Amino acid sequence: MKWLLALALLAGAPALLQAQGQPANPGAVAKASAFELEIAAPDEIRTLLEHQLELLRYRELTDLSDPELARLLTTARQNTRDLLATLGYFSPDINIEQRTTDGATVARWVKLSVTPGPPTLVTGVKIEFNGAIANDPAARSQRQQIEANWLLRAGMRFTQAGWDAAKQQAMLQLTGQRYPAGQIGSSLADIDPGTHSARLSVTLDSGPAYRLGPLVISGAQRYATELVTRLARLTPGADYDQTQLVQAQQRLTDSGFFDSVIVSLDTTGDPLAATVRVQLREALMQKLVLGVGASTDSGARLSAEHTHHRVPGFGWRAVSKLSLDRETRSLGSELTAPPDADNWRWVTSALLQNQNIGSTDISSLRLRAGRGQGGQRIDRNYYLQYDRAETAASDGSVPVVAQALSANYAFTVRNFDSLPFPGSGWGLGVEVGGGSTLGSQQDPYGRVLGHWLSYLPLGGNGDAAASPLRSGRLALRAQAGAVLAKSDIALPSTQLFLTGGDNSVRGYGYHDLGITLPDGTISAGRYLTVASVEWQRPIVANGRVTDWESTVFMDAGAVANKPAELRAKVGIGVGARWRSPVGPLQIDLAYGVSVERLRLHLNVGFTF
């Protein structure tokens, strides 16, 4: 054993010596550099030179001779001038100093001093059009949009990056609608170093206008091509629009029938009937997904979801799911028909659920049948629904059973800039229903529930790129609900309201806010109000926006059986957001003012 210990010590000796600041090999010396370079320039220019200057590549050549270094310094002057030109500085003052030092590791010292001089400003922009777009009256708005959205305007500093970005933006707008074969015919940035001005001109050649032709579908084996056509919703004869092709591809992908989808326009054929190619890789006919998760509202969660894309006999898709967590146990199944020509689908579903809400235990059954239409921005649904709920209090009293049958209509409008990580925009959802209780006493009732979410970017005038770093955005959320009925009506508790938790009023437990009964138990109520304001600000590291955001928020919510009895419970706190691969991760520490305690909230995903 001693010899093993000795070998181990011997093997670790070099690392130990290095850790103590001693060279592992006493005969080794530090590697010498050919020269040391100091750059004296404004921050923006120094950063560019430190990353792009070719002279830096030769710094570690220990055998670099004095004549070779002199030649490199001459080249470095022109290289520096070229690099500054990309930032709009065409008359810089460049000075290079060189001296020999007495150091052991660096024999020569070079100082590059740069005074950039006045920046070059854009004094004029000329955009011309050739091809079909030039004289087509239908393309007038597209021409105006390209001109209006030109990025490098008169009065702005000329940079190569800005010039390239402006041309790229113009090309995206040109080829995004009607003219997919468009290109830049010519472009010129006429720089006058004497007056520090730049005149820009670009000619956009559109080529012919394209219209959509037939769909050519490849890869469809399990599912009918008619399904692909209905999901794509691309009309032959319509003007080409890249956005419509992207949306068609997204609809096909989101349908669940396909693992991958590529929708593209074939520009080699007749422009008036261009073939739309749809390349598919179909999903398996059946799929089983097992899930494990957790949230502060409901604790650990286990789930199993089975999907059959075409149930034998009638061809509908069936999705069945079992979910278990601390608060809820549920088993449900949904049958969905293929979409019709207008993208409406028949839908039926059944859900068995047992929930621990507040101090009550609710066992419920929900049956639903109706039709739905989903879109990029708008979802619509109308359906009949049967509800049965058996509510048992913790005091051991006789459970209360209530049943109801209702007709409902729901719609959701989304106007966010990007999902699932919106930075601006808004969303609105409304559910309206009416029906009657069932059983010995049949009473009519009405129910309405609405929710709103909006993101408002902050920041005033100035550098558009820096504004979000300074100010972030406000997230505003509101929810309101009401059940209109006689005071003594016996409604299923699933038709009433509770609030509190990760996505409502933070600082309180899941569904902890309701009507407090004389015995201290919590029950659902007929009226609901929730409001929230949250300041979200990106976290910046080394001058760059990270995938994290900090938040400060205040929530308020109330539940009551009469509007006059609504008394808001408030929660305040701070948190963080992370753009995770599976969606936004929400981490919040909230203080419930009414209960005077802190509560941690964790949640993943964005749903509206």
Image: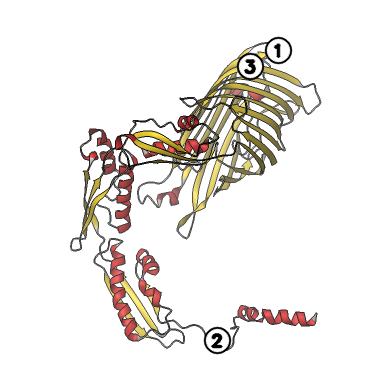
Residue 67 in sight here = yes
Q: Is residue 108 left or right of residue 313?
A: left
Residue lying at 34% horizontally and 69% vertically, measured from the top left: 41
Residue lying at 30% horizontally and 44% vertically, measured from the top left: 181
Q: Which residue is mark 3?
A: 405
The alpha-carbon separation of the residues under discs 3 and 1 comes to: 11 Å
Q: Are marks 2 and 1 in contact (CB under 8 Å)?
A: no
- The three-letter code of the residue at mark 1 reads Gly
Q: Which residue is mark 1?
A: 439
Relative to 313, residue 32 above or below: below
- For label 1, the crowd category at 10 Å Cα-Cα, with few meaning under 14, some 14 to 19 and many 20 or more, is few
Residue 509 in sight here = no
Give percent across and percent down for residue 201: 21, 51
- For label 2, the crowd category at 10 Å Cα-Cα, with few meaning under 14, some 14 to 19 and many 20 or more, is few
Q: Foreground: 371 or 59? A: 371
The alpha-carbon separation of the residues under discs 2 and 1 comes to: 94 Å
Q: Which residue is mark 2?
A: 28
Q: Foreground: 577 or 583? A: 583
- The three-letter code of the residue at mark 3 reads Leu
- The three-letter code of the residue at mark 2 reads Ala
Q: Is residue 96 left or right of residue 368?
A: left
Dot 2: what SS? loop
- Quarter of the image containing the N terminus? bottom right
Give percent across and percent down for residue 248: 44, 36
